Image (spheres, grey):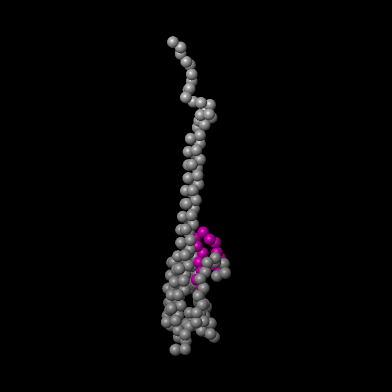
């Protein structure tokens, strides 16, 4: 009886060179999957950020149209709405000449402060041509801005004329 002493006779030299390649392929596929997953998370985060910015633009448009409708309903006193700058919950106006206009602007300022981060709203009226310019500015969280209208990165400007002929 002859005994053969062979070690791993089923492994040829070509198979021995490939040993561990399945593990390497698995690690590479896990790495590619991880990179793709990180990319998807980044895209989702960007989509959420863009959605929030669209909400701020929509809120600013709503606030500007809201004060414009109040001005047009009170067209006889439209000049009293102008030259007012409201920031947060403070109110500063050089032309406040009526309880109605002042009260409306205070409510509007409170709404701007509650809805927009770092919100600032300015109403300017020109008596000569009965025009009103409404600027709503904001600086989303994480963005720096000075308190001047020019310093804000985002703003919505609404220009309109008030029909004062029926008064």
Name the residue nearer the viewer: 59 or 10.
10
Q: Quadrant of the rendered structure where residue 114 is? A: bottom left
Of all residues shown, which one is farthest toward the front?
1
Residue at position x 44%, y 89% from top? 166
Residue 96 seen in this snapshot: no
Name the residue nearer the viewer: 22 or 167.
22
Of all residues shown, which one is farthest toward the right?
150
Task: Residue 136 in the image: state x and y as whole percent.
Answer: 50, 71
Residue at position x 48%, y 54% from top? 43
Q: Main secondary structure of the magenta part?
A: loop
Task: Residue 165 in the image: state x and y as whole percent.
Answer: 47, 89
Quadrant (top left/top right/bottom left/bottom right) for the C terminus = bottom left
Quadrant (top left/top right/bottom left/bottom right) for the N terminus = top left
Task: Residue 60 in the image: state x and y as whole percent.
Answer: 47, 70
Q: In this view, does 151 lie above or below 38?
A: below
Task: Residue 66 in the image: state x and y as whole percent.
Answer: 43, 75
Q: Is residue 12 above or below residue 34?
A: above
Q: Does the magenta stretch include residue 138?
A: yes
Residue at position x 50%, y 32% from top? 20
Of all residues shown, which one is farthest toward the bottom?
166
Residue 58 seen in this snapshot: yes
Q: Give the range drawn in magenta.
A: 135-148
Q: How many labels does the image show?
A: 0
């Amino acid at each position: 009886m002859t005994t053969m002493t062979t070690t791993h006779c089923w492994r040829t030299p070509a198979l021995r060179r490939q040993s561990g390649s399945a593990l390497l392929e698995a690690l590479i596929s896990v790495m590619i999957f991880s990179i793709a997953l990180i990319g998807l998370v980044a895209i989702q985060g960007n989509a959420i950020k863009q959605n929030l910015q669209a909400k701020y633009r929509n809120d600013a448009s709503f606030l500007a149209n809201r004060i414009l409708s109040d001005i047009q309903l009170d067209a006889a006193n439209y000049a009293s709405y102008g030259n007012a700058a409201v920031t947060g919950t403070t109110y500063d106006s050089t032309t406040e000449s009526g309880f109605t206009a002042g009260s409306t602007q205070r409510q509007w300022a409170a709404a701007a402060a509650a809805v927009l981060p770092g919100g600032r709203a300015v109403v300017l009226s020109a008596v000569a041509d009965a025009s009103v310019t409404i600027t709503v500015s904001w600086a989303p969280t994480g963005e720096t801005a000075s308190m001047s209208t020019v310093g804000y990165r985002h703003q919505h400007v609404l220009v309109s004329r008030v029909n004062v002929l029926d008064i």
